Image: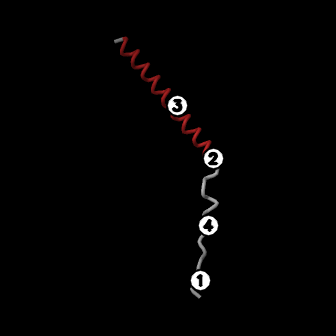
Amino acid sequence: MRWLVIFLLVSLAGLLVAAGGILYHIAMKHRELRRTPAEGLDAVEEPEIESEI
């Protein structure tokens, strides 16, 4: 019974470490995307409105 509790606690700690790593990775990617401008935004132009006259 004691081994099951130890295994449960070790597994829980491993899951918490993995979840923390995923959150850290996501936060770093968001920071990176906020710092660098998106590619191709300068090339996008608004379409000209054609008049029917």
**Residue denoted by label 3:** 21
Q: Which residue is mark 4?
A: 45
At label 2, counting other C-alpha atoms closer than 10 Å, the crowd grade (few under 14, some 14-19, many 20 or more) is few
- Asked whether the residues under the numbered discs 4 and 1 touch, taking CB atoms below 8 Å apart as contact, a structural biologist would say no
Tell me the element at label 4. Answer: loop
Which badge, 1 or 3, comes first in the chain's sequence? 3
The label shown at residue 34 is 2
Are the residues flagged by discs 2 and 1 in contact, CB closer than 8 Å? Answer: no
Residue 49 at what x, y percent from top left? Answer: 59, 77
Res. 43 mark: none
Compared across the picture, whether 47 is left or right of 2 comes to: right
Q: Amino acid at mark 1?
A: Ser
Q: CA distance from mark 2 to mark 1?
A: 39 Å
Disc 4 vs disc 2: Cβ atoms closer than 8 Å? no
Give how far apart the Cα atoms at labels 4 and 2 are: 22 Å
Q: Residues within 10 Å of mark 1 (few under 14, many from 20)?
A: few
Q: Label 1 belongs to which residue?
A: 51
Label 3 – label 2 distance at C-alpha = 20 Å
At 60% from the left edge and 46% from the top edge, which residue is drawn? 33
At 37% from the left and 11% from the top, the residue drawn is: 2
Q: Report the side of 8 relative to 37 (left or right).
A: left
Using the image, determine if residue 40 lies above or below residue 27. below
State the CA–CA distance, disc 4 to disc 3.
Answer: 40 Å
Q: Residues within 10 Å of mark 3 (few under 14, many from 20)?
A: few
Residue nearest the viewer, comparing 39 with 15: 39
